[in-house]
Image: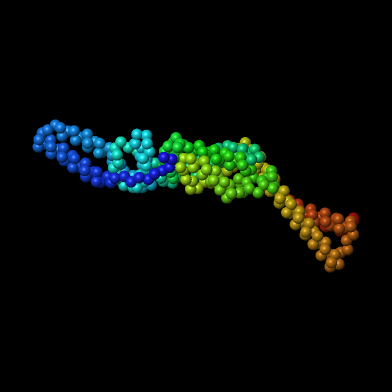
Amino acid sequence: MKHEKNIKASSGYLMLGLLLLVIIGMITGLVVSENPLFVILMAVILFIIKGFFIVNPNSSKVMVLFGAYKGTVKDNGFFWANPFYARQRISLRARNFYSERVKVNDKIGNPILINVILVWKVADTYKAAFDVDQYEEFVRVQTDAAVRKLAGSYPYDNFADGQQEVTLLSGMDEVNEALENEITERLAIAGIKVLEARIGYLAYAPEIANSMLKRQQAVAIVAARKKIVEGAVGMVEDALTKLSADDIIDFDEDKKASMVSNLMVVLCGDKEATPVINTGTLHS
């Protein structure tokens, strides 16, 4: 037997009625005949009582008889089964697992902190009970292993590799899908069904966080400056073209160079420009 087998247990209420009849018979026999042999019925009563059990909603009982798996009771209610059965309760409810933050290296070697939020449930009670030891601990360990493997498969961001399309930071959909597939494959041996798996926390490790923040700021400043320069060049070009087209002023190369220099300083400078009134010529 390598897979779950559902079985039907006897109604507990029918056996409870039989138990009451046995108790009444024992008491009546002792009172009427005063025969101590009726005390033997006490062993029968205890035997019957041991067979009662309850299965709550979204729960199950795994039945084992002298080391042999006999099946799993998933129906809810009050039941009776062979008193010699060893019964193990396994919950079928969906459960959340919020892993601890672990420090790992991403694909390019940067230390990062990462954890995962996992929603799972037991799908095969036989595998959960007999194929692994302590299936809940198995879920925890294998999830941590999957997170470490995932973090080493992607870079945190694409600063070092501009051609890298999928990163832990920007490719969340693809990364979460890869994480879910990895955890599902690892937990299949324990009969666990993964309902959802996604990254819950992601950040650089403290020892490089400040350096990486400065790098991000530098990249943002360079990108902003690039946009400013591109816009300034276009504005200067439009201004010179407009001035020449309307015959407002005739530029020679020196005047054009001076005009371009002044406009670029004004448009690209960090501070507001301070106007200077020139009362002479452009060459004075």
Residue placed at 65% from the left, 41% from the top? 212
Q: Position of residue 100 (x, y in %)?
A: 52, 38
- Answer left or right for 254 relative to 23: right
- Answer left or right for 38 relative to 274: left
- Answer left or right for 68 relative to 212: left
Q: Is residue 220 visible?
A: yes
Tell me which corner region of the image, top left, top right, bottom left or bottom right, holds residue 83.
top left
| Outermost residue toward the left in this view | 32
- Answer left or right for 65 relative to 118: left
Tell me which corner region of the image, top left, top right, bottom left or bottom right, holds residue 109.
top right
Tell me which corner region of the image, top left, top right, bottom left or bottom right, holds residue 56.
top left
Q: Nearer the viewer, residue 231 or 6?
A: 6
Q: Position of residue 64 (x, y in %)?
A: 36, 37
Q: Nearer the viewer, residue 224 or 78?
A: 78
Q: Position of residue 239 (x, y in %)?
A: 80, 62
| Outermost residue toward the top in this view | 36
Q: Nearer the viewer, residue 186 or 93?
A: 186
Residue placed at 58% from the left, 39% from the top? 149
Residue placed at 75% from the left, 57% from the top? 231
Q: Quadrant of the C terminus?
A: bottom right
Q: Position of residue 142 (x, y in %)?
A: 51, 38
